[in-house]
Image (cartoon, rainbow, N blue to C red):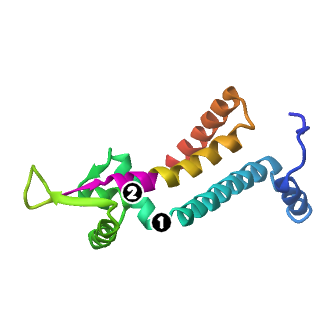
Amino acid sequence: MEPSTSPEDSTDRHVERWLPVLPELDADIEGAVTRMLVVTKHLRRVRERSLVEFDLQKHEHDTLHALAGRGGGATPSELVHDLDLAPASVTGRLEALERRDFVRRTPSRADRRRVDVQLTESGWQAWRQAIAVVGREEHRILAALDPDERRLLSDLLRRVVLRIEE
């Protein structure tokens, strides 16, 4: 494969710096992994700024996100599973979110000993606003690729993830 004719990025400079120190370094592997880290760090910073902008803590957003992913409602035990937290931690999060009017806990219709948790309209709005910022940035940066290239990138990364998940 021929070297890229694309402009040099910070990862190219990183690889160039390390090749004399580690001659056995595979520049393509180092380049791919480093670029994935750059993208991940960038999107994490965008997410953190959006949370500040909308006055959300990361753990609040994570809980709202878990509820949204279940259609806006879940049981505390489902959230324990989804968030991989201790039950007491989820209870604390739900109490704080309820004080902010982001969630409502009501007795379960199926079992009165349990509660159901629902996103309120303000909870949905807070989640949507924060997630929209990240979504716009994802679209902006991946617009560097045409649709076929984005599909190829997704397929290639799927193969990498499947290797991780083996």
Q: In the image, is residue 126 part of the stretch drawn in magenta?
A: yes
Side of 36 relative to 85 (left or right): right
Helix, strand or loop at label 1? It is loop
Q: Are marks 1 and 2 in contact (CB under 8 Å)?
A: yes
Label 1: few (<14), some or many (≥20) within 10 Å? some
Q: In the drawing, what numbered circle is on residue 56?
A: 1
Residue with the mark numbered 2? 64
Q: Residue at x 35, y 67 (%)?
A: 100
Across and down, in percent, residue 5 comes to 91, 38
The image shows a total of numbered marks equal to 2
Q: Residue furthest top?
A: 148
Residues in magenta, as a range: 116-127
Q: Residue at x 53, y 63 (%)?
A: 51
Question: Comparing marks 1 and 2, which lies closer to the viewer?
Answer: 1
Q: Residue furthest left?
A: 112
Name the foreground residue: 146 vs 18.
146
